Image: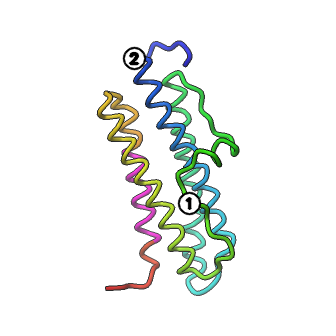
Amino acid sequence: MIATHNSLSENIRSASASLLNKALSTAIDLQGQMKQAHWNLRGPGFIAVHKLFDDAAALAYEQGDALAERAGALGSEATGTIQVAAKSTILAPYPLKLADAPAHIEAVCAALAAYSTQLRDASQACTQSGDISSADLFTRLLGAIDAQQWLIEAHQPLTS
């Protein structure tokens, strides 16, 4: 940790930075998974779902940037390399060889759900430690991911 005038204790800042960097790794992986789906999608409803996957990739990129900047504000280094992300992401590997929209939608929604769980848990941990600014960031990111997931899930066939 570097010296900062941030009023949180170094222990709290360090714990929050760890959560932020873990989520950063997942956001980097999520962006790649969304682009994988975007590039390989085929079938009915292509253009709408193709655009949604691109929007999800852009959202993951923006969220990664916000997570990294908050880690920096706490006096930590943002660890956002592909190598670190590959080791630290909580996402399952994206299934390759998918083409049809329903299979991609299922894989994308599973990744979004895992990331949203990570964000929710991190928000609760930061709230408990007293880092309400990091908790607020995680909560705002979670809301955007939940909204994106809802838009993508709307393209799944209805089941009862």
Residue type at mark 2 is Ser
Measure the alpha-carbon separation of dots 2 and 1: 34 Å
Magenta span: 139-152
Q: Main secondary structure of the magenta part?
A: helix
> In the rendered image, which residue does mark 2 sit on?
9
**Residue drawn at 58 percent across, 69 percent down:** 51
Q: Is residue 141 magenta?
A: yes
**Rendered-image quadrant of the N terminus:** top right
- Which is nearer the N-term, disc 2 or disc 1? 2
Say which element carries label 2.
Answer: loop
Residue type at mark 1 is Ala
Q: Is residue 43 magenta?
A: no
**Residue drawn at 29 percent across, 33 percent down:** 128
> In the rendered image, which residue does mark 1 sit on?
92
- Near mark 2 (Cα within 10 A), the count class, few <14, some 14-19 or many ≥20, is few
**Rendered-image quadrant of the C terminus:** bottom left
**Residue drawn at 40 percent across, 53 percent down:** 117
Is 49 rendered above or below residue 54?
below
Which numbered disc covers residue 17?
none
Is 78 rendered above or below residue 12?
below
> Where residue 84 sits in the image (x, y, percent)?
65, 41
> Where residue 138 sits in the image (x, y, percent)?
41, 42
